Image (cartoon, helix red, strand yellow):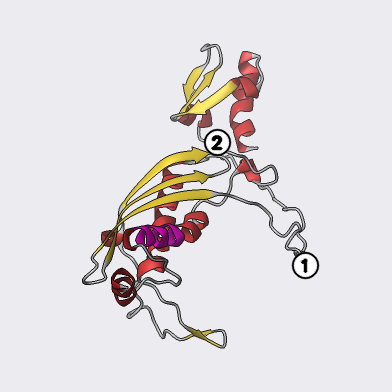
Amino acid sequence: MVRTQLLQPLAHKFGMSTELLQIADGKITSYDGVLSTTVTEAMDGKELWATAQCRPHPTEPLDESGQGDAFVGLAFCAIRAVVDVDIELGSVRVVEMAVAQDVGRILNPSQLATRIEAGVTQGIGAALTENLRTARGLIRHPDLTGYALPTSLDAPDIRIVKLVEERDVVAPFGAKPASAIPVVTSPAAVAAAVRSATGRPINRLPIRPQAAVAVAKS
């Protein structure tokens, strides 16, 4: 679409297909090195735009055995958490999170890393500080003043050790959600690490200091 609009004049000029041209680091080059120019020069003041729609396949509710096509897409994530637990005070500090994630296709590496790090940090909040209270479907917190959201000071060392590009065949460009996956996976990783440190299971979140002390001493 926009890529074709940008490359078509150059491809026509040099008698080659747009598929033989690649864009990287702000430059347009051909497979044989004959063509080399910048994107700015190729734009030459032109406005390029396109509109597209993605219609995911229809889903159906799961049957009685829990089987069915209920999701538009699936992604997977594995996280290892390293924590420090003070068995006297019951405090839990996340030291490191190592992430391996199925991302479909990497479109913007720097943005992808940022979204994964944000998702991990949000998941740590769900594991240690946040406690969303509801009554009959209504949130009981009047504002965020007393709601303990994690900040940059609470974020541990987050290492992205592996990104798996298993493309989604129905999603635009094969990409998959990036930040929502570690939000779900991080709390379980933190709970597993606390369980490993204390020797007893953690059955509810967030992990309060009182719970960590009780688990450690029991």
Q: Nearer the viewer, residue 115 or 34?
A: 115
Q: Quadrant of the N terminus?
A: top right
Q: Quadrant of the C terminus?
A: bottom left
Residue 124 seen from this side: yes
- 80 lies above or below 1: below
Precedes in sequence: disc 1 or disc 2: 2
Q: Nearer the viewer, residue 83 or 30?
A: 83
Give the class, few, some or many, for how many residues have Cα within 10 Å of label 2's Cα (few <14, many ≥20). Answer: few
Q: Secondary structure at mark 1?
A: loop
SS assignment for the magenta stretch, majority: helix
Q: CA–CA distance between discs 1 and 2?
A: 56 Å
How many labels sit on residues? 2
Span shown in magenta = 186-196
Looking at the image, residue 57 sits to the left or right of residue 210; the answer is right
Looking at the image, residue 61 sits to the left or right of residue 41; the answer is right
Q: Position of residue 73 (x, y in %)?
A: 66, 52
Q: Secondary structure at mark 2?
A: loop
Q: Which residue is mark 1?
A: 64
Give, as a three-letter code, the residue at label 2: Lys
- Residue beneath the point at 39% across and 82% down: 143
Residue 50 seen from this side: no
Give, as a three-letter code, the residue at label 1: Glu
The verdict on residue 125 being magenta is no
- Residue beneath the point at 52% across and 40% down: 107
Q: Which residue is mark 2?
A: 46
The verdict on residue 191 being magenta is yes
In this view, the mark in front (1 or 2): 1
